[in-house]
Amino acid sequence: MIQDPLFTMNQSEMSSNDHYTPKWIFNLLDVEFSIDVAAPPNGVPWIPARRYFTQSDDGLSQPWEGLIWCNPPFSDILPWVRRLNEHRNGIALLPHTKGAWRREVWKYADGIAEWDTLTEIRFINLGKEKTIFPTTFLAAWGDQALQAISNIGRVR
């Protein structure tokens, strides 16, 4: 179990989609988000978001406002990408995989940034670093998000 008192979760509360973005990514982005729309129960203490929606809140059905952070469940990315396409103000961490959602990102996102080097992202799972997807990228919608992802690498 993760030992942070603000981030308590046991194995029964987790699913195969529960892999949390490491803090160093937020340090590079250097921005505060209005909402983390796909957060675990109790949120993640190192994600700089004023609010969060958990699975029980159903982040897709909630009203979104301001700058959004989205590390969606990788098993069902398309509805999250579509919602970001509509909202037009946020950043998503996405895997390099094939899927219908990729066409929507390429068509509608304002920018995409990949790491300058082949950086292996070690996602957090139950307080331990665990490599899940060795190649990921950030997609941005809106000027503030576009500026933030430029801190990661070249934006296309």
Image: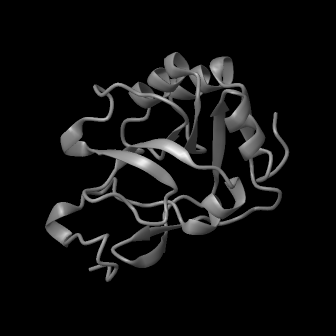
Residue 56 higher or lower than 12, as above or below? above
The spot of residue 69 in percent (x, y) is 51, 43
What's the residue at 70%, 35% (across, down)? 144
Residue 85 higher or lower than 121, as above or below? above
Q: Going by the picture, which residue comes out furthest to the bottom?
A: 3
The spot of residue 14 in percent (x, y) is 23, 61
Quadrant for the N terminus in the image: bottom left
Q: Is residue 38 left or right of residue 107?
A: left
Is residue 20 or residue 103 the one in the foreground? Answer: 20
The spot of residue 82 in percent (x, y) is 47, 21
Q: Going by the picture, which residue comes out furthest to the front?
A: 50
What's the residue at 57%, 20% (across, down)? 104
In terms of image quadrants, where is residue 94? top right
Residue 29 higher or lower than 150, as above or below? below
The spot of residue 9 in percent (x, y) is 23, 69
What's the residue at 44%, 61% (across, down)? 20
Q: Is residue 155 left or right of residue 57?
A: right
Is residue 14 or residue 57 the one in the foreground? Answer: 57
Quadrant for the C terminus in the image: top right
Q: How many marks on residues?
A: 0
What's the residue at 38%, 46% (across, down)? 51
Q: Going by the picture, which residue comes out furthest to the left?
A: 12
Is residue 63 or residue 14 the one in the foreground? Answer: 63
Chosen colour scheme: one colour
Q: Is residue 86 left or right of residue 16?
A: right
